[in-house]
Amino acid sequence: MNAMWPARAAGLYGVCVNGGAFGLFYYDKQQAINQGPRIPERTLCLTALAGGWIGGLCAMNVFRHKTVKSSFQAKFWLSVAANVAAVAAIAHPATRGSIFNAFRHSRAGLSPPARRFRRYGRGRR
């Protein structure tokens, strides 16, 4: 297996999510001009949370869209901060190990049959 596939997948994800965010901001600007149905602010902030904040920032500056609305700016920057903090936590080796260990050893998300299977091997007989 190629060792570069995680980096390529992350790069492809970044390009897609930022391109999508840019496109959503462009579409919302066009809808604002034409007085059509708008993209909810929540959706635009979720794109920032998902990693598309660079595309969103570029689109806001290029199209001069939502740059003055302070309530949106506060939500957007909170989403950016949450995304950056999550990426930093995952990228840090000590944190990454503890996150994966906690996820691996956590049984809270498993259904009762899956918990039983994990605990006793093949399930109770």
Image (cartoon, helix red, strand yellow):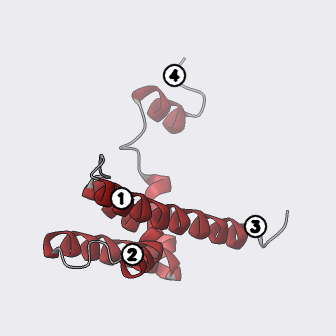
Say which label, 1 or 3, has the lower sequence index: 3
The residue wearing badge 3 is 5
* Residue at 69% over, 73% down: 7
User: Where 106 sits versus 99, above or below?
Assistant: above
For label 3, count other residues whose C-alpha is less than 10 Å away and answer few (under 14), some (14-19) or many (20+): few
Residue 70 location, quadrant: bottom left
Instruction: List x then y, in percent, for residue 61.
Output: 38, 82
Disc 2 marks which amino acid? Phe
Q: Nearer the viewer, residue 91 or 104?
A: 91
Between discs 4 and 2, the one toward the N terminus? 2
Give neighbour class at mark 4: few <14, some 14-19, many 20+ (Cα, 10 Å).
few
Pointer 1 local density, CA inside 10 Å: few below 14, some 14–19, many at least 20? many
Q: Which dot, 4 or 2, sits closer to the camera?
A: 2
Q: Distance from label 1 to label 2 (Cα)?
A: 10 Å
**Quick one: label 2 or label 3, which is nearer the N terminus?**
3
Which residue in the protein does label 2 denote?
63
Secondary structure beneath label 4: loop
Residue 124, disc? 4
- Say whether disc 4 or disc 3 marks the residue closer to the N-terminus: 3
Closer mark to the observer between disc 1 and disc 3: 1
User: Rounded to the nearest whole Å, what is the CA distance between mark 2 and mark 3?
Assistant: 35 Å
Residue positioned most to the front = 34
Q: Which mark is residue 28?
A: 1
What residue sits 63% from the left and 69% below the top? Answer: 10
Counting from the top left corner in percent of width and height, residue 20 is at 51, 61
For the residue marked with disc 4, what is the amino acid? Arg
In the picture, the quarter occupied by the N terminus is bottom right
Compared to residue 108, the image places residue 15 above or below, namely below
